[in-house]
Amino acid sequence: MYVLALVTQKGGSGKSTLAVGLAVAAMENSRRVALVEADPQGTIWRWKERRGEAYPRVDRVSDPAYIEPVLARLEAEGIWLTIIDTAATNNAAALRAIARSDLCLIPARPSPADIEASVPTLIAIRRLKRRFAFVLNQTPARGSRLSEAATSLNSLGHLALPYMVQRNDHQDALGAGLGVTEYAREGKASEEIVELWRWVLKRLVEGAVGHEQDARQAAG
Amino acid sequence: MSKTQGRRPASDGRLARRSMVDLAVEASRAVDEALVATPVRLIADSVDHPPLLEQVFERPDRIEAPQGPTAPIHAGRPAVPNRPAVRGCERASGDSAAEMVVQIAKDYQNGVLNHIKAGLSAALDHARDFAETQPTAEGTDGIGRENHFMIAFGAAAAEFRAEALELLKANVTATLTYAEDLAEARTAAEVVELSGTQARKNCELMLKQADALRSLALAVAKDRVGDA
């Protein structure tokens, strides 16, 4: 089972919206996708209530100690991808999510506040030697500020592609209990999230291959 | 009046915007510096977190029991003097790491303390309900028995508070050790292992608390039966 964590202590960066969008996009590969909500805000839980479908499965974790057991159970149930949505703070839950993830995504808007807020998250990720990438989120469609932010985030680490442009479809899909790929399949927001999912999947698979090679080398 | 008369050029009255690229360079430096910082020293600052004893020993409104011990708790670690506030990007990196780890410790500590607080309230409620539901002899002086019960109950509650104090000490020590170990963890596997160990310690403490609850209930019950 792949584990993808969305982490940053910056509120309003779009973690939950991205988590939902990616989870539904990933269901194109296989339906058995799960979301673990470690954010007491409950955005994904309410989205699931509106959705009324079995997948993606949603588990809500109020105690950080339950993250590991929940992941173990999901894997035992045949879930192939779990996306963990964390709260906008660096707490024990976020740390455990980072520790258990194959890839961490750090959503950041093109703003100084979002870049600054990523520092504690980056420290945690690098100390735990996890793979990560920034996602430039809620961006304007174009402009010098966008390219400047992209340059900035690239200097701090990998930057996932494409950028997620601020589009109403994301919010409307969330309100309707749908993924943006279900809500407006032909829309630009849908295209972007599908492309982002492909980018993420490629890194997840590459990471898994890398781990296997490391294990073989260690065994040899 | 022209429609554009009220508009000002974009550059008018605005200071130069801070470059996000420069900011990223500072952020990168902050991350690198934090990674080489010694986390243990930073963790020690969490000892200075205001004690939550008042919160823990907040008395249930419905119960009248004597005040328990109010001596300050020492977590088994030397007190660390407050360091002066730091300014600037270079020091901010250390602060960020400290804040993150201390926040983790605080979150955990708050969770444990809330458990104890809930247990304390439940114990007092349970003991009172237990005593009130015991059969009483006909014709006994109700007022005198009630007074006697309150005295016995107060003594038992004080005993429980002392027990809870010891539990709290153990919890604080365990939490700080956990936070310190967490900060020193180098791999994900270590974090998971530490978390499991901490969960076990927490469980053991909760069992002790359950024993204390049972003792309190028995003490009140014995007194009640003897009175009847």
Image: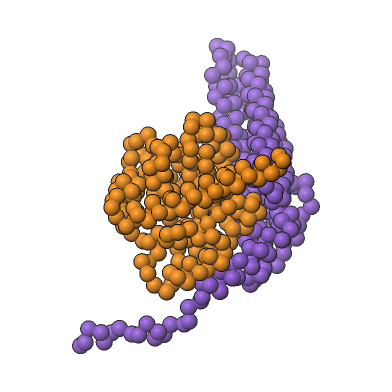
Chain colours: A orange, B purple
Indicate the position of residue B221 as horizontal and vertical percent values: 63, 20
For the point 58% across and 22% down, which residue is it? Answer: B131
In the shown orientation, is residue B57 left or right of residue B81? left
Q: Can residue A192 be spotted in the picture?
A: yes
Q: Quadrant of residue B13?
A: bottom left
For the point 57% across and 56% down, which residue is it? Answer: A121
For the point 67% across and 47% down, which residue is it? Answer: B187
Q: Check the picture and name the quadrant holding the C terminus of chain B.
A: top right
Above or below, comparing residue B87 to residue A187 in the picture = below
Q: Residue furthest left?
A: B1
Q: Can residue B57 be spotted in the picture?
A: no
For the point 28% across and 52% down, which residue is it? Answer: A186
* Tag count: 0
Q: In the image shown, does A101 or B173 lie closer to the viewer?
A: A101
Q: Quadrant of residue B80?
A: bottom right
Above or below, comparing residue A191 to residue B22 in the picture = above
In the shown orientation, is residue B8 left or right of residue B34? left
Above or below, comparing residue A17 to residue B83 in the picture = above
Indicate the position of residue B117 as horizontal and vertical percent values: 60, 38
In the shown orientation, is residue A26 left or right of residue B34? left
Indicate the position of residue A37 as horizontal and vertical percent values: 47, 43
Q: Residue furthest front?
A: A220
Q: Residue furthest top?
A: B138
Q: Check the picture and name the quadrant holding the N terminus of chain B.
A: bottom left
Q: In the image shown, does B180 or B162 lie closer to the viewer?
A: B180
Indicate the position of residue A4 as horizontal and vertical percent values: 51, 46
